[in-house]
Image: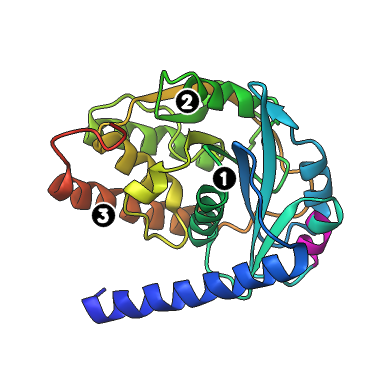
């Protein structure tokens, strides 16, 4: 993508973010985020989201929690369900991808009071008890970035191709970064709220590997914690087919690694 196209995409993203933020404030008033923010990106999850938000913890490591769901293009009432439950729902007017939705969520959390962020999924595949398991090393200042790992824990996923892909991409990123990684696309990740602003995050969809590689290659103290991946509660995954998903994910991994090699700082970004 050339410089002009990149600039136009950034301008478009900023406009979409502004529209979504204005709608959030108009619908729910001033945004006040607790020290811990649970950020969820959701797309067409009306059948799952009520149970998901209802199961989220009110405290993590004795810190009060706010829940923020970024709806990546509203067309089924997901946002209305979240708001009716008393939580923040930021509704983007168009579908851009999970990466763009999470970037917006990180920004809202950081700018409105959060000190720590932990991510989860909107489809019920994550265990709410695992959020504290992953975020605790960050709150205790033993780590800057913590990833959940289904391979250290367990998975109920029955797609053997996807399960093999988890192993393959973990091996690839471990080789490229020199850091052992077992699960590169787990939905549960914990970090300080300011970390995403210190990294380059530009992928609209496959943001998990971009965030992971960026954090590792900028010297963040990295850990993994065992978590459980459940079967999806209802509906079907919005991800593309296995082959296409693998090709696109691999492209993001290599692009991010090459980019970060050129800009790796002498000192860790978290320092």
Q: Which residue is mark 2?
A: 138
| First-in-chain label (3 vs 1) | 1
| First-in-chain label (3 vs 2) | 2
Q: Is residue 263 left or right of residue 66?
A: left
Write the residue at 19% across / 50% down. Answer: 258
Write the residue at 33% across / 38% down. Answer: 215
Element class at badge 1: loop
| Residue 163 placement (x, y as % from top left) | 52, 36
Front of the two marks 3 and 2: 2
How does the figure colour the protein chain or chains?
rainbow
Front of the two marks 2 and 1: 1
Q: Which residue is mark 1?
A: 113
| Residue 244 placement (x, y as % from top left) | 45, 59
Camera-nearest residue between 37 and 262? 37
| First-in-chain label (2 vs 1) | 1
Task: Compute the Cα span from label 3 to label 2.
Answer: 28 Å
Front of the two marks 3 and 1: 1
- Kindly tell me whether residue 154 is visible in this rendering: no
**The C terminus - image quarter:** top left
């Amino acid at each position: 993508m050339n410089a002009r196209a990149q600039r136009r995409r950034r301008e478009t993203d900023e406009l979409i973010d502004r529209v979504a933020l204005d709608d959030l404030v108009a619908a729910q008033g001033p945004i006040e985020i607790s020290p811990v923010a649970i950020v969820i990106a959701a797309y067409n999850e009306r059948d799952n989201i009520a149970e998901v938000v209802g199961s989220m913890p009110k405290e993590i490591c004795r810190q009060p929690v706010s829940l923020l769901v970024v709806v990546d293009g509203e067309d089924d009432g997901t946002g209305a369900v979240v708001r009716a439950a008393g939580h923040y729902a930021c509704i983007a007017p168009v579908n851009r991808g999970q990466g763009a939705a999470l970037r917006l969520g990180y920004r809202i959390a950081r700018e409105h009071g959060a000190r720590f962020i932990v991510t989860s999924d909107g489809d019920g595949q994550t265990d709410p008890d695992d959020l504290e398991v992953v975020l605790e090393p960050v709150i205790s200042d033993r780590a800057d970035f913590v990833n959940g790992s289904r391979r250290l824990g367990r998975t109920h996923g029955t797609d053997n191709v996807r399960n093999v892909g988890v192993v393959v991409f973990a091996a690839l990123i471990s080789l490229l970064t020199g850091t052992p990684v077992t699960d590169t696309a787990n939905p549960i990740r914990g970090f300080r709220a300011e970390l995403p602003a210190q990294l380059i995050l530009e992928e609209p969809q496959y943001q998990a590997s971009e965030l992971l590689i960026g954090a590792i290659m900028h010297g963040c103290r990295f850990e993994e914690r065992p978590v459980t991946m459940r079967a999806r509660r209802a509906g079907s995954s919005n991800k593309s087919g296995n082959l296409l998903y693998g090709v696109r994910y691999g492209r993001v991994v290599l692009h991010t690694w090459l980019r970060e090699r050129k800009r790796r700082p002498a000192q860790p970004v978290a320092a």
